[in-house]
Amino acid sequence: MKKIAFSVVFLFAVLSAAAQETATDTTKYWTKKGNISLLFNQSAYNKQWLGGGTSNIAGNFGLNYDFNYKKEDIVWDNKFILAYGLTKIKGDEKTAKTDDRLELNSLWGKKAKGQWYYSMFFNFKTQMDTGLDKNDDKISHFFSPAYFQLGPGMLWKKSNNLSVNFSPATAKLIIVHPHFTEFGPSFGVLQGDSTRFEFGASITAYYKFNIMTNVSVENRLNLYSNYLDNPQNVDIDYQMNVIMKINKYLSANVAVQAIYDDNSIQAVQVREVFGLGVNYGF
């Protein structure tokens, strides 16, 4: 708990310092934009269909919101991501999750020279709903696991669509409920514990570009090496989001995420979501 309290106090100190920089500013220094998407997938077969298949329906909700600040030699980029999806298979009484993410990224920088900035970054991610394995046993729920990263570093920012942040002294905290570690480790937290503290280096990269008119690709990559335990085993979290706009309100979306964290499972975790639905920018 001391580590949690320290991380929270440190975060508030950083945000308070940044707030003092902006206290006398007007909203003209802020750039805010967001996107809401509601995607649907359906497959239906009648009794006479000989090709095989099971009728199912799925829906995914996504919220992506950016609120960025820039004034003279100060930049402060913030991104909030919320995603949740369910699928229902005919004949199955239960619904299953297809997506469940809650994430906040905050990156503060003060210009050093050219496109380089002294930086401080913060990342928080968790999930909102209960997660079940193939045997319907509970393996996760809200704030369990929860991940925090915080650290100073250097930011290279060419534009709002291309940046790389390197933090050689990053603190990382993983939190799980004790009932998940009662009989063994969970998400890297040892048996009997509820937290795991790591200290290492982090690289965060962001790149967004247009393939063609109305087709944009957003890429986010986070690499982390823990100095305290097997630093050669680098944690990888890569996310890609492709938006293909049909018109102002309709779009086709493809979301892909690949995760490698040998403390959780020594394999690559891959998630892919594709759908056609309503897309609204604000």
Image: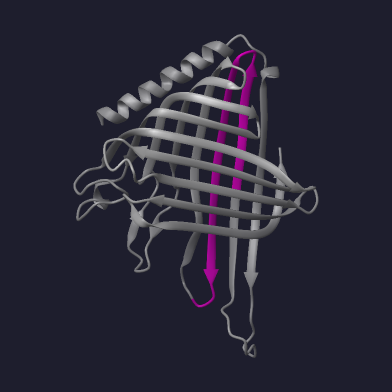
Residue 235, quarter of the rendered image: top left
Q: Is residue 232 above or below residue 61?
A: above
Task: Using the image as rendered, state which of residue 32 and residue 169 is in the foreground.
Answer: 169
Residue 243 horizontal/vertical position (percent)? 69, 50
In this picture, residue 140 sits left or right of residue 195: right
In this picture, residue 267 sits left or right of residue 32: left
Task: Using the image as rendered, state which of residue 105 and residue 63 is in the foreground.
Answer: 105
In this picture, residue 197 sits left or right of residue 204: left
Which residue: 34% across, 69% down?
A: 135
Residue 222 horizontal/vertical position (percent)? 48, 40
Q: Is residue 116 above or below residue 134?
A: above
Residue 280 horizontal/vertical position (percent)? 71, 45
- Secondary structure mainly formed by the magenta segment: strand
Residue 149, quarter of the rendered image: top left
Q: Is residue 102 above or below residue 52?
A: above
Which residue: 55% across, 20% down?
A: 117
Tell me where the magenta segment starts and ends, as one range. Answer: 62-91
For residue 154: magenta?
no
Q: Is residue 150 above or below residue 84?
A: above
Task: Using the image as rendered, state which of residue 264 and residue 37 is in the foreground.
Answer: 264
